[in-house]
Image (spheres, grey):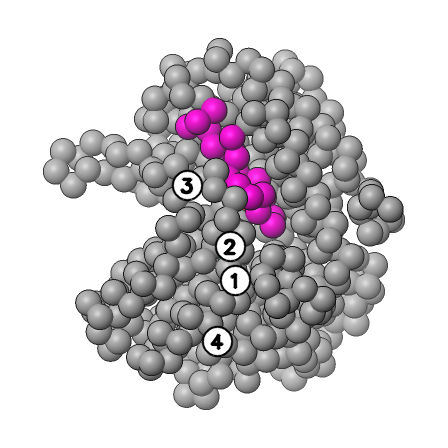
């Protein structure tokens, strides 16, 4: 059979309210053209994030009922720990309420002022938590990632030569850890190859630096290794994930992505002394080490979800459905980051809307248009989110790229929803020359993208 179907059927439905063009226009005006400020009831297809938006399976809902809410020593923790250890293999498993809590605990234990931490590309909370701990976050994505249209199979890779240079320049004592983000979310949802993780591990091992994985989308990354990397065809996706984690000294994880859960995360390490310090900090701010800020039922949902995320029928459908969206819009001429990522499609708004100056935010303008056209909510990853200040003049400098991310929630939408998104994108593309830029009329001093308000230029 050629058709790859959703490998599940629907047991519970969540109605979508279909809005009119007038209602959407009013909602946009009320939100100041900032899609974070929309009410979700006014959104038809929500592609704002793939985080915490998965549909849980019947087995996950059943596991929820087994949740033991004891403060200490809950068997739900044992099941959670066993599931995590089975895939990730680390000695210590520390539950947290979500990924960024794992980051905060790891970095406040390991990092201090004067430290530098290299990563293929830091996610924004990872960077912010490192900077909060006083360390400098350095992004070293591979050179292939710079050309958005290059279909290289592992554009998430780290630039290993750049890593060597950083180690030489700063010295290993200033580098408390190296991190690799799989898949590379901020770099287009692109995978990292096993060969690249091995090469990075080699540099780390020679210099005595621990290697940590930001593991949010580990199952999608392992799938791409099997599909694209020589020597991995026919291997089980789980064994690929196990092989990858065996190269690392620890990981941070947001179970809201490839944990198929609506909340949760964890931190792992093989280091006994570090684990002790991390658990002490966990008790201070998150909770006792057998629940870490989660309910017992959340631990159960994650224990099941992590294993389901590795089911190969699910991953085949997941990759096919994201690629289906990417291939349809790109064959109509819409420029996207190639190849399509695991969890999202990223549209290159600077190429699609060349008539809009970078500081009139072409990606924000495109995101607004997609909502106006069909009630689709996406997120701008461009100069609204990442503009910098010129250190001399203080004027705003545009971000390197102007992207719109269409993130696909796991198991939540069907092919006809995706067809609807394609149709809307083609509609917007057909009238692209009439799309206007935006100017900011109100903004916060940092993380302005969440609350800024805009008006049309
Ligand atoms: N690391 C990566 C690569 C992420 O994508 C995220 C979250 C985190 C860490 C933090 O995890 O949200 O559980 O605290 N990404 C979401 C997104 C928010 O929309 O890409 P968290």
- Residue topped by disc 4: 248
SS state under label 1: loop
Q: Is residue 291 visible?
A: no
Front-most of residues 240 and 439 = 240
- Asked if disc 4 and disc 2 are in contact, CB closer than 8 Å, the reply is no
Q: Position of residue 193 (x, y in %)?
A: 52, 62
Which of label 1 and label 4 is nearer to you? 1
* On screen, residue 258 above or below 332: below
| 223 sits left or right of 379 in the view | right
- Asked if disc 1 and disc 2 are in contact, CB closer than 8 Å, the reply is yes
Mark seen at residue 154: 2
As drawn, the residue found furthest toward the top would be: 434
Look at the image and give the residue range highlighted in magenta.
335-352
Q: Position of residue 113 (x, y in %)?
A: 23, 67
Membership of 336 in magenta stretch: yes
- Residue topped by disc 1: 193
Q: Residue at x 82, y 44 (%)?
A: 2
How many neighbours does mark 1 have within 10 angstroms: few (below 14), some (14-19), or many (20 or more)?
many
Front-most of residues 192 and 63 = 192
- Asked if disc 3 and disc 4 are in contact, CB closer than 8 Å, the reply is no
How many neighbours does mark 2 have within 10 angstroms: few (below 14), some (14-19), or many (20 or more)?
many
């Amino acid at each position: 059979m050629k058709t790859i179907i959703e490998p599940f059927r629907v047991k519970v439905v969540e109605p979508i309210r279909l809005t009119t063009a007038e209602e959407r226009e009013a909602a946009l005006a009320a939100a100041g053209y900032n899609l974070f400020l929309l009410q979700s009831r006014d959104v038809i297809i929500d592609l704002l994030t793939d985080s915490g938006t998965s549909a849980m399976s019947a087995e996950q809902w059943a596991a929820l009922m087994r949740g033991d809410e004891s403060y200490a020593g809950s068997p739900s923790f044992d099941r959670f720990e066993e599931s995590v250890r089975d895939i990730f293999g680390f000695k210590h498993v520390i539950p947290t309420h979500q990924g960024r809590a794992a980051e905060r605990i790891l970095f406040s234990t390991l990092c201090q002022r004067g430290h530098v931490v290299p990563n293929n590309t830091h996610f924004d909370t990872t960077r912010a938590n490192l900077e909060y701990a006083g360390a400098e976050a350095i992004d070293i994505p591979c050179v292939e990632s710079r050309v958005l249209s290059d279909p290289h199979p592992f554009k998430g890779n780290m630039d290993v030569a750049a890593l060597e240079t950083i180690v030489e320049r700063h010295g290993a004592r200033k580098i408390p850890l190296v991190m690799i983000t799989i898949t590379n979310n901020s770099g287009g949802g692109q995978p990292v190859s096993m060969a690249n993780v091995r090469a990075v591990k080699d540099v780390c091992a020679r210099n005595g630096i621990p290697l940590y994985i930001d593991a949010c989308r580990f199952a999608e990354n392992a799938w791409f290794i099997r599909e694209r990397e020589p020597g991995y065809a026919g291997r089980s996706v789980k064994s690929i994930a196990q092989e990858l984690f065996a190269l690392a000294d620890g990981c941070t994880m947001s179970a809201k992505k490839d944990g198929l859960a609506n909340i949760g995360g964890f931190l792992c390490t093989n280091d006994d002394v570090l684990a002790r310090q991390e658990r002490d900090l966990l008790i201070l701010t998150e909770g006792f080490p057998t629940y870490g800020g989660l309910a017992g039922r959340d631990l159960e949902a994650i224990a099941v979800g992590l294993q389901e995320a590795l089911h190969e029928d699910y991953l085949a459908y997941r990759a096919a459905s994201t690629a289906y969206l990417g291939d349809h819009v790109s064959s109509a001429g819409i420029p996207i980051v190639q190849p399509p990522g695991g969890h999202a499609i990223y549209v290159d708004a600077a190429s699609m809307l060349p008539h809009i100056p970078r500081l009139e935010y072409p990606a924000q303008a495109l995101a607004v248009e997609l909502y106006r056209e069909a009630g689709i909510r996406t997120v701008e990853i461009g100069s609204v989110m990442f503009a910098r200040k010129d250190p001399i003049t203080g004027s705003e400098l545009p971000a390197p790229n102007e992207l719109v991310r269409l993130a696909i929630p796991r198991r939540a939408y069907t092919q006809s929803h995706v067809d609807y998104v394609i149709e809307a994108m083609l509609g917007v593309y057909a009238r692209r020359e009439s799309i206007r830029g935006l100017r900011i009329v109100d903004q916060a001093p940092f993380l302005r993208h969440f609350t800024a308000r805009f008006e049309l230029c």
